[in-house]
Image: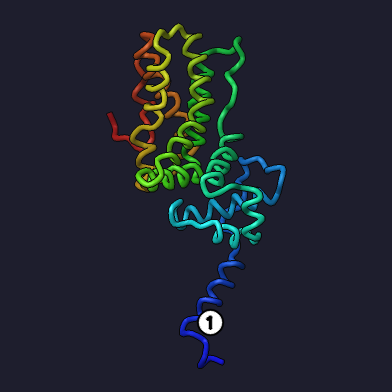
Amino acid sequence: VSNIVPNGFHARVAMKRAQIGKPLKTGRPKWLAPLDDPRNETILAAAFDVFGEKGFHGATMLEIANRARVSKKTLYEHFAGKAGLFRALVAWGGRRNLPAAPPPPDSDPVAALEAHARAILTAMMRPESLALVRIVAAEAVRFPELGRDFDAQVRKASVAIVDALAARLGIADAAAFGADFIALLRGESYFRVLIGALPPPRRAALTRQAHHAVQCLLAAYCSSPAPSRSARPYGSSPW
């Protein structure tokens, strides 16, 4: 039989079988709420693994179906295509990853802003979030719509919260305030973690960085005292 089978056929079959049986690398993190349909969760975990290995462009629906151990027909019954899968991944992470509503109106707006900064930094520095950003950045030229979808999903709720807090603080230009808020969080330390130059910071470092960002923002917009030197950002050089 081996004489009439094309060269490499057995190797390709073995690779295919190994791929179908390949276990998922990514289980659901503790911080992430389970989905109502366990099959969707399995499919999204498989998509996360394949996107991480192959990029959005290199991933195929067939490979994701094989990794999830479902048929291609079943995969398309749950998700229309790769873009839909990626949007669902981002939505799943954002559902519990970031606050969705402004804090109560009777809360301290400065404390609320700092708490929101901590929540955003914690979400941004999670390995899963960093992996998604790297995938989006790698495909930005070929699939700019992927970046637009990602940006819209992760920014919308946060912008509304910061706008509401800016109004309570008496900030006239809420848009500029919000842009500077995000810029201070997505600073040098985040970039260095994103490219692998630094490991993700621990909770205490995130708390210090959130405090530093909010103090800088208040100093610029509310004439508050400048931040102390002890609050320098994670990964920065001494002042």
- Dot 1: within a 10 Å radius of its alpha carbon, few (fewer than 14), some, or many (20 or more) residues? few
Q: Is residue 127 above or below residue 239?
A: below
What residue is drawn where x is 60% and y is 34%? 95
Q: Between residues 106 and 76, which one lies in front from this camera angle?
A: 76
Question: Residue at horizontal 44%, vertical 57%?
Answer: 58
Scheme of image coloration: rainbow
In this view of the protein, which residue sits in the foreground, 116 or 225?
A: 116
The quadrant the N terminus occupies is bottom right
Q: Nearer the viewer, residue 11 or 82?
A: 82
Could you tell me residue 108's position as x and y percent? 55, 12
On screen, residue 17 versus residue 202, left or right, reads right
Q: Amino acid at mark 1?
A: His
The number of numbered discs placed on residues in the rendered structure image is: 1
Q: Position of residue 195 (x, y in %)?
A: 36, 46
Q: Is residue 55 above or below residue 231?
A: below
Residue 187: x and y in percent read 35, 32
**Residue at the spot 46% in from the left edge and 47% down from the top edge:** 131
The quarter of the displayed image where residue 217 is located: top left
Q: Which residue is mark 1?
A: 10
